[in-house]
Image (cartoon, helix red, strand yellow):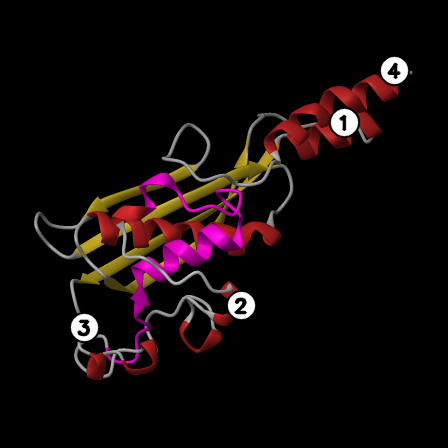
């Protein structure tokens, strides 16, 4: 039974760490953060750190990207903006070793310990440029038509907040109590709406 106890002891922290990435301000393990690049500017840096896992959480990447996009939309709305673009983006997996030293034994227990000594964390960083209003000619098909950010995707902040809340059922199908501060969104199926222009993923530099 000693081997069984060893598996339980090692696996317990794995189960504790490897839970679905939630949505909250950055704490010791995960969450969002943001900063204004310059005082009174319309440019922000937005980040989201996903949960730490004991195996590569490739299936969590879309969720972490979506949560970073959600925070980008919230920051836009909180500062009086209606639209934003992602001028630059970075998504990567950070690998951290928790224990030092070698584990030469090839027993089941040692192999589990070796796996548990490493954590993987998906991190996403966006740089956003925000707009109070954009005339229709400049955002045809939700894409900037001219200027420095020509061909960049244009995101409607209200729609991003609404769609991601619905996508992940973040409020049990109900809008957040403070959602009334945002522009009302028609209550139609999210399958009829897309926060990703052209049906694609987050679009930044078209080059």
Q: How many angstroms separate mark 4 from mark 3 (CA)?
A: 66 Å
The residue tagged 4 is 2
Going from the N terminus, do you reach mark 2 or mark 4 first? 4
Who comes first in sequence, dot 1 or dot 3?
1
Q: Are marks 2 and 1 in contact (CB under 8 Å)?
A: no
Q: Is residue 204 visible?
A: yes
Nearer to us: label 2 or label 1: 2
Q: Is residue 149 above or below residue 18?
A: below
| Helix, strand or loop at mark 4 | helix
The answer to whether 141 is drawn above or below residue 185 in the figure is below
Q: Depth-wise, is mark 1 or mark 4 nearer the camera? A: 4
CA gap, disc 1 and disc 3: 59 Å
Q: Secondary structure at mark 2?
A: helix
Asked if the residues shown at circle 2 and circle 4 are in contact, with their CB atoms under 8 angstroms apart, the answer is no
Q: Residue furthest left?
A: 40
- Residue range (magenta): 150-179
Tell me if 27 is positioned left or right of 1 in this view. left
In the picture, the quarter occupied by the N terminus is: top right
Whole-percent x, y for residue 47 in the image:
35, 47
Label located before the other in sequence (4 or 3): 4
The percent position of residue 28, horizontal first and vertical second, equals 42, 27
Say which mark, if any, is on residue 191: 2
What separation in Å lies between label 2 and label 3 (alpha carbons)? 25 Å
Q: Nearer the viewer, mark 4 or mark 3?
A: 3
Q: Earlier in the sequence, mark 1 or mark 4?
A: 4
- Mark sitting earlier along the chain (2/1): 1
Lower sequence index among marks 2 and 3: 3
Q: CA distance from mark 2 to mark 1?
A: 47 Å
Kind of element beneath mark 1: helix
Circle 3 sits on which residue?
134
Number of disc labels: 4
């Amino acid at each position: 039974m000693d081997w069984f106890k060893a598996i339980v002891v090692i696996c317990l922290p794995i189960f504790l760490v490897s839970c679905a990435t939630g949505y909250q301000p950055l704490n010791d393990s995960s969450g969002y953060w943001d900063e204004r690049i310059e005082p009174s500017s319309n440019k922000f840096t937005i980040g989201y750190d996903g949960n730490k896992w004991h195996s590569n959480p490739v299936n969590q990447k879309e969720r972490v990207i979506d949560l970073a996009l959600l925070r980008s939309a919230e920051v836009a709305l909180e500062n009086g903006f209606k639209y934003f673009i992602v001028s630059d983006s970075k998504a990567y997996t950070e690998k951290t070793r928790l224990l030092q030293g070698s584990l030469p034994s090839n027993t089941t227990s040692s192999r589990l310990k070796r796996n548990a000594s490493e954590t993987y964390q998906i991190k996403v960083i966006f740089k956003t440029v925000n707009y109070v209003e954009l005339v229709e000619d400049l955002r045809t098909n939700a894409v900037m038509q001219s200027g420095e950010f020509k061909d960049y995707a244009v995101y409607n902040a209200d729609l991003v907040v609404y769609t991601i809340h619905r996508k992940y059922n973040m409020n049990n199908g109900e809008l957040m109590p403070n959602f009334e501060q945002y522009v009302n969104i028609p209550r139609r199926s999210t399958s009829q709406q897309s926060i990703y222009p052209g049906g694609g993923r987050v679009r930044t530099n078209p080059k």
